[in-house]
Amino acid sequence: MNENNPSCYRFGVSYTCPICKSTKLIKSGKTTNGKQRYCCKECSKRFIINYSYNAYQPNTNQQIILFTKEGLGIRSTARVLRISITTLLKRIIAIATNIQQPPIAKGKSYEVDEMRTYIGKKSRLRWIVYALERESKTVVSFNVGRRTNKTLKHVIRSLELSNTRKIYTDKLKNYRYIIHKKIHNTLIHSTNHIERHNLSIRTHLKRLNRKTICFSRSLVILMAVLRIYFWG
Ligand SMILES: [Zn+2]
């Protein structure tokens, strides 16, 4: 596979194991359409060199992440990569589950805000609640759900565990009940950074564009796409 690495030339072609990158490979029978199959002696995985189906190409997952962040929706990504929509959805979930939430630094200030979106149809209104660290402008926690204390709490609790200095929010009543008075701030213009960040997310992610029919059809995929966008 790796054409730049001369150490992995065997059988007249250059390649390594796509799973463990080992060069210790042996021939291992043929596929039904006559392609040579190889077996890795280190990890015992079997593979072929030129897959006909594009989803099996080694860089497909990187491209899925790239296109998702560049504002392509599910169907346009599937068209560009020439893979099926079902495969793409499965891959998005698989990629997202492997992404770890970054640790929340102690003693920082955060802005928390909600962003409106729909799941499946316009009557099914949902809110994306997320926390933005003020200095580094990184998203440290998010949740999707109805605009209730339960949804907001998930984000606020994760912040409180890390000795937060201040939490800046808008004047939504729910925050008064779930954030301690000492660290809560609702001053005007105090959520400017996160409001601007909302606009960036709406521009970058196809499913959050406004005045379109491109909103998410599934909560699971929306959560997965947000995870890839924030931390992937
Ligand atoms: Zn291997």
Image (cartoon, rainbow, N blue to C red):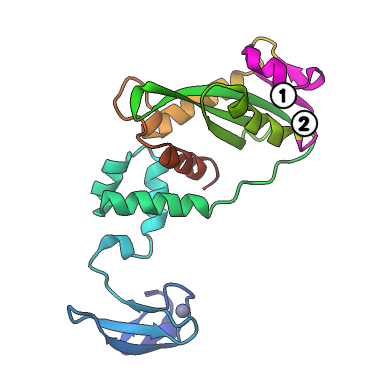
Which of these two is toward me, 225 or 148?
148
Residue drawn at the location 71% of the way across and 15% of the way down: 176
Per the image, label 2 sits on a secondary structure element best described as loop
Q: Quadrant of residue 142?
A: top right
Would residue 166 be visible to someone looking at this image? yes
Amino acid type at mark 2: Thr
> Is residue 166 rendered magenta in the image?
yes
Question: In the image, is residue 86 above or below residue 143?
Answer: below
Q: Quadrant of residue 141?
A: top right
Which of these two is toward me, 180 or 37?
180
Q: CA distance from mark 2 to mark 1?
A: 7 Å
Residue numbers of the magenta segment: 161-185
Amino acid type at mark 1: Ile
Question: In x, y percent, where is residue 73?
Answer: 32, 39
Q: Which mark is residue 208?
A: none
Residue drawn at the location 47% of the way across and 76% of the way down: 21
Question: In the image, is residue 46 above or below residue 133?
Answer: below
To which residue does mark 1 refer?
A: 167
Question: In x, y percent, where is residue 204?
Answer: 42, 33
Residue drawn at the location 76% of the way across and 37% of the way down: 161
To which residue does mark 2 refer?
A: 164
Question: Badge 1, how many Cα within 10 Å: few under 14, some, many 20+?
Answer: many
Question: In the image, is residue 102 above or below residue 17?
Answer: above
Question: In x, y percent, where is residue 12?
Answer: 30, 88
Q: Quadrant of residue 31?
A: bottom left
> Is residue 194 rendered magenta in the image?
no
Could you tell me which quadrant the N terminus lies in?
A: bottom left
